[in-house]
Amino acid sequence: MKRAVILSVVLSLAIPLWAGKKDDVDPRLAHVKSIFVKGNNQAADKAREILRKGKTCFALASNPDEADAVLEMADSATPDTGIFGSMGARHNVVSGTLTLKSGDLIWSRSERFSDAPLMSGAKTAADILIHELAKDADCKKRKK
């Protein structure tokens, strides 16, 4: 009985630490200079817009053959059942996966954001996601 209690306490303290630990960044991400964004949704459009404006250390490629990597952007949404539900608001989950030409997946994240009046949750989540990618790629240091 005491072992079960001790194990329960240890797991309840350790699990949040494991859950909060961010994955190590793949070192190959530092060599990616150009990205082709794959997707036909608001999240992909927002990612292309950010890359096109030069807000990261990545160049936007117009063709996957010319890119160092392909960023596939997926967007899924469920209707909001709260106050904004009657106004067509949604909960959006945007996922991005970055794959090298070799087919190796080197980066993957997802962000969640809800629509608000006059604001797209998918675009906001994509903005957050692209900035996380830039942070993981250490773009601030690379742009200098």
Image (cartoon, grey):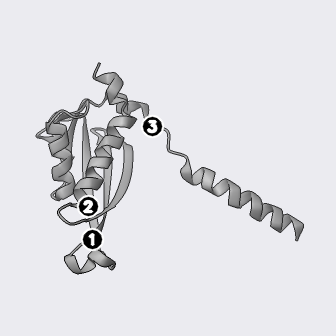
**Vertical order, 1 against 48 (above or below):** below
Quadrant of the image occupied by residue 119: bottom left
> Of helix, strand and loop, which one carries label 1?
strand
Q: Quadrant of the N terminus?
A: bottom right
Image check: 61 left or right of 85? left
Quadrant of the image occupied by residue 25: top left
> Of helix, strand and loop, which one carries label 3?
loop
Identified by mark 3, the residue type is: Val
Q: Circle 2 sits on which residue? A: 121
Q: Residue at x 38, y 43 (%)?
A: 107
In 3D space, how far apart are the residues under numbered discs 1 and 2 (Cα atoms)?
Answer: 7 Å
Identified by mark 2, the residue type is: Gly
* Residues tagged 2 and 3 counted as in contact (Cβ below 8 A): no
Decide which of tag 1 and tag 2 comes sooner along the chain. Answer: 1
Q: Quadrant of the C terminus?
A: top left
Percent across and percent down for residue 82 are 33, 78
Image check: 62 left or right of 76? left
Image check: 124 left or right of 24? left
